[in-house]
Image (cartoon, rainbow, N blue to C red):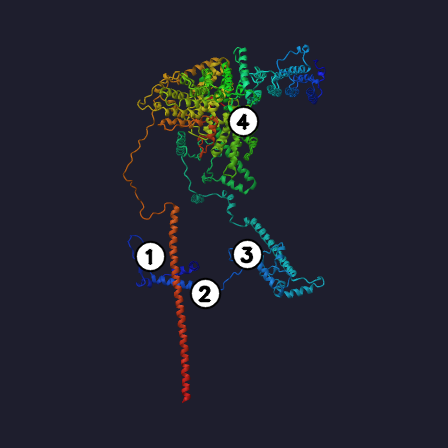
Amino acid sequence: MMRKQQTFSRGLSDKVRKSKAAPEIQKNPFEVKINRKKFDVLGRKSKHDVGLPGVSRSRAIQKRKDTLLKEFRLKDKNNTFIDRRFGEYDSKLTPEEKILQRFTLERQRTQDRKDMYNLNEEEELTHYGQSLAEMEKMTDVIDSDSDSEEKGLLSAELTATHFGGGGGLLRKKSAGDEEEEHKPRSRQELIEELIFKSKQEKRERQTQKEEAQELTEKLDQEWKSIQNLLAHKTPKAERTDETDKPKLDQYDMMVRELGFEMKAQPSEKLKSAEELAREERQRLQTLEADRLKRMMGDAEEDAVQTNTHVSADDMNDGFILDGDDRKTLAYKDGKWNIEGEEEEKEDEDGDEEGGEEEDEDDEDDAEGEDDEEEEGEDDEEDDADEDHCDLQSDEGSEDEDGQGAEEEQLCAEEPPAVSEEQKKAAQEAARAELPYTFPAPESYSDLKQLLQGHGSEQQRLILDRTLKCNHPSLSAGNKAKLQKLFGFLLEYVGDLATQNPPDLRTVSALIPQICGLCQMFPEAACKAVQTLLSDSGHSMEETLEVKGRAPMPDLDMLVLLKITALLFPSSDFRHPVTTPAFLFLSQALTRCAVVSLEDVCKGLVLCCLALEYVSLSQRIFPELLNFLLGLLHLTVSDKHNMGTAVCVCVCVCVCVCVSVSQVFLNQCRISILLCVDLIITLLCDLHREILDAIPEKPSQHAPLVFKKKKPIPLKLFTPKIVQILDYGKKRGNTKEEKERERLKHKYKREFKGALREIRKDTRFLAREKLSDVMSRDAERKRKVKELYGSLATQEGEWKALKRKNRK
Amino acid sequence: MASSTDSNVKGENSQVSYKKYINTKTDRVLQSKKHANDIFDVIEYLQSEKDKEVIFATNACSKVFCQLFYRGDLYVGDLPEEEDLVNGDRSAEEKYRIFMRHRYSNCVELLLENIGHKAFQVKETSLCALMKFVAAEGKHPLQNLDEHYNFPRELLQTLVEHLLSEKEDMSLLISRFQEFLEMDDVRYYVMSSVRDNIYRVMGRNKKAVIPVYQNNVFTLLSTINVPSEASKMKHFLVRQDYKLEQWKVAKLKEHKRAFEQMWLVFLKFKLPSNMYKKILVILHESIMPQMSDPTLLIDFLSAAYDIGGAISLLSLNGLFILIHKHNLDYPDFYKKLYSLLDPSIFHVKYRARFFHLVNIFLSSTHLPAYLVAAFVKRFARLSLTAPPTSLLILLPFICNLIRRHPSCRVLIHRPSTAEEPCDDPYVMEEEDPAQCHALESSLWEIKTLQKHYHPDVAKAAMKINEPLTEQEDDISELLELSTFELMERELKAERKTIPLEFDTATELLKSSREVLGVHFSLE
């Protein structure tokens, strides 16, 4: 009750409370109650130091009088709604039973009075006087909205039918259609007709309304088209065309600049070159520290990969996940530097042309960047080649391979010689053939179709564009697509490597894309490489079991191992990809049979890979040494058969063995035409180098000692002293506990308050009741008195009359 | 009797005709003695070109002669010459029986020849038919013999002789023959005939190695299993009711002796090296328990042990059983074992078995410390060339050895000496474990392996940094580990994060630590 009352009278009570008591009351010392304070705290303002109990009590009473009393007075005097439906409040009955019972009751009721005034044979259920059965047949249901619309419009006929009495209608109709109608139409039919007519009317009205609507719209449009001519103030969207035409004066510029500055978001300040370099260095340092930790194997668990960096040698190939593309507003030579924006806006205006233009612009930009990159790369290559060249000249070797390499090098050097314009033109021509967007390939064959028949650079471009078009931030499904794409790419690379001749240049060209994908989806990449490794490991195991020995892994596997080294850190103590790769290498080096020169070559590649894997972590790889030793023994045993080529192998072997890195023999095609004396000189060099590398004395080892253990501290018996920081009541520590505590407290207070209020209410009501009773009693007494009085007067009069008569 | 005249009226017409023909002939032979000559036609088919005809004829022959055995229509006793038959004064009945007996021996000869036929089906049917004859002869003996209790020993011997061909691999047929070896009497006589056969063949070949023959012998021998209990010997091809107790065949001891003799004879001669391996693999499981005196194998085993390599490793098992169960004293066993340790032990097929055995050999705590130290040091040295799967066995194994022999702890913990490095006093080339100065050395190899590329190996090697726990590591489940399993384990492990290389690669052969690109280029 209280609650209800409160909600009911919230506004009222507030009003009562807010009305300040009169100042004289506040000053009246009899009205004021001063709440005693326990401590006087300086600077604390308390609200409740002075109370006005009389005022607040009277307020409360007033409030009750306004709300509770009114309700009390009205009690038992309002009408109430009593639901007498069968079993409405019986929770034991299921709805079906209820309905069944009601139905039987209904039937019984009608059954009972069947003979009385039954007009129709069958009982018909009606709604608003219409048969429900008929309503069901109707296809069109009357719209309640239109019903309401109808309210004001009452046709004469309608009113006549509705208010003229059904009888009149019946009479009239039956009289009018007597000749055509053989039997008189029933009331029902008439009503039907009536409904039909009203509906028709409604439909007409609707069509009218729609037409009116259309006309208004048309008018609106026309108005818009001529609005530009009329209005002086053009809307903002169309205004930009004109903005660059009027001459900008100094003031305008200033104002606008200021305006924009005010609105501009605070952004990070531009970093200077040193700052950037420092940051980059720091990032690399942290990464390196991370890597070292992983290498040691202690921080296996808490190694968290940060993936947000943009490398210094980033290829600008679209992998900046959250690049800030907003253009900063600036003036350049006194002109507003917003060409890009303008263009974009123009594009928005012109629907069809604009899109293409924009694309082209983007492409131009991209090409520019690409060009730069390529130049950079070329430079790098040149450098590398020069190095190569130097080294070769040092060596003084004039073998065919060397020449071949030089030729290659020449080829590589040619492009810079071509003038920049030509180059650009050529590139543009090449690129003109390629579309700008590519769907992400759904299957491996798709990818193959996409890439086949293009040069390596083009393939890279295609992939690049595919990645850009299907960047995961663009659409939800792209992530899965690109994840799949990584697997396909690896497969494709494998295919390229197994081709005859192998297309390793393309593989090399695709490396940045693969790297980028791997950086984007480490899990998927890991899975893909793992599957490939496990597949080939499995097949090798099977052949080993069947035949006892396995062939050397093919070139695709070698390429995969190399790519693995590029993608994943091989220095980690334990890594989901590189550790199996290590095992694969080990298996290949120990179990694969070396039958031909090709096998030797493959084995040496594997050795190089193994060395590369462990080069940073400086781990021991026994299989590598075993293999090289075995190879050396092989050459020693039949030197004459294998000839010079093997000697070259041995050179490489030994070189790898002592990891001396100045060997320039192109191992992929070992030429048998190498001059013997060259080999001898080479061998002499090598011999010297090896002797240098191998220390004179065998390595010495200190005897092993266990690691020193930390002494276990003695048990201490002094008590442990803990500083207590919060005195008093313990509060819950967590947020939830605190919240819980707070709510509990609140509830308690509310509960108490409610109880108090209820008590006051009852007291108030009791008082009221009592006063009612008292007043009623007083009234009665008064009336009785009155009666007695009148009776007394009557008696007196009567007595007086009697006395008079007696006299 | 005159030979048949219509032998040329052969049904070359169709496939069905020869069946019909043979059937009618067989029926006629069996129906009356008048048509005895028809048997020639049937026998002739045994030499036919067509495999099907041979098979059919073989079946027909076995049917005919079994029937004849049953009827007693074959002559019993020493067979007179066929030429003598004409002038001899014998009854017609007797003549008929002698004639049939001759045909029977013809038939057996042809069947034996067919054992060497090129079609396996023919071989198989011939073998079955011959075994049927063996059974029939056993039941109705053709000779009056006492000592062998009616068992047709000669027939079986010739059969074995043909089975153990010197030119052809008969392993398939021998495996078919295995089912007859279930029969105890057949087995017994086969064993004795094999023994004789080996003597004869090897003697003829002047003790040289005959791989095909020896392979056949081995196949036959390895299929022979002597029952473990005498009560199980109840399956006989030929039942003997007379003087069963004294019959050698029914005695388990005799069986064992025959088995032993057979094997010893076989092992006495020089064997090809792969045969050594085959024998040694099954030796401890299926040969030694069935011999009455396994110590007789010592010659063979020590010879095998001296061969070296994998064969030595395998012979360890047999030697171990002899030493362990039969109280054999083998001088310099540990010295030889020590010299067996070379890098190849990690790559042979029998690695698991070898480590299992070495673990057992070195499990005794009564071994001298120098010996154990020598083994430990040698294993440690070898571990520098071992693949990860072997290392995962080897490292816990070395730790176990040091645990068992606390005096070897100096190998990993020598606090007295200062930290100054010195040369390793261990002599790898020394054959004698007593002279190799292992106890003065340290296990720096294990220290080196702490930098092994495989994390598990590195972790296992780390254990020597601290005092070893009391509990020994169980290496039994590591024994069969293969590299691929190791790889699988690594692949299936759940990882939270996958660290990536942070240096973004731009080209295949261009990375921060390029080795491949230095030596190789793309072309």
**Dot placed on the residue nearer the N-terminal end, 3 or 4:** 3
Q: Are discs 2 and 3 located on one and the same chain?
A: yes
For disc 2, the marked residue is A74
In the image shown, does A265 or A331 lie closer to the viewer? A265
Q: Are marks 3 and 4 in contact (CB under 8 Å)?
A: no
Q: Chain of mark 2?
A: A
**Could you tell whether B270 is left or right of B88 in the image?**
left
> Residue B141, located in which quarter of the rendered image?
top right
Q: Amino acid at mark 2?
A: Leu
CA distance separating discs 3 and 4: 78 Å
Q: Which numbered tag is attached to residue A98?
A: 3
Q: Residue furthest left?
A: A718
For disc 1, the marked residue is A48
**Dot placed on the residue nearer the N-terminal end, 2 or 3:** 2
Q: Are marks 4 and 2 in contact (CB under 8 Å)?
A: no
Callout 3: few (<14), some (14-19), or many (20+) C-alpha neighbours within 10 Å?
A: some
> Residue A146, located in which quarter of the rendered image?
bottom right
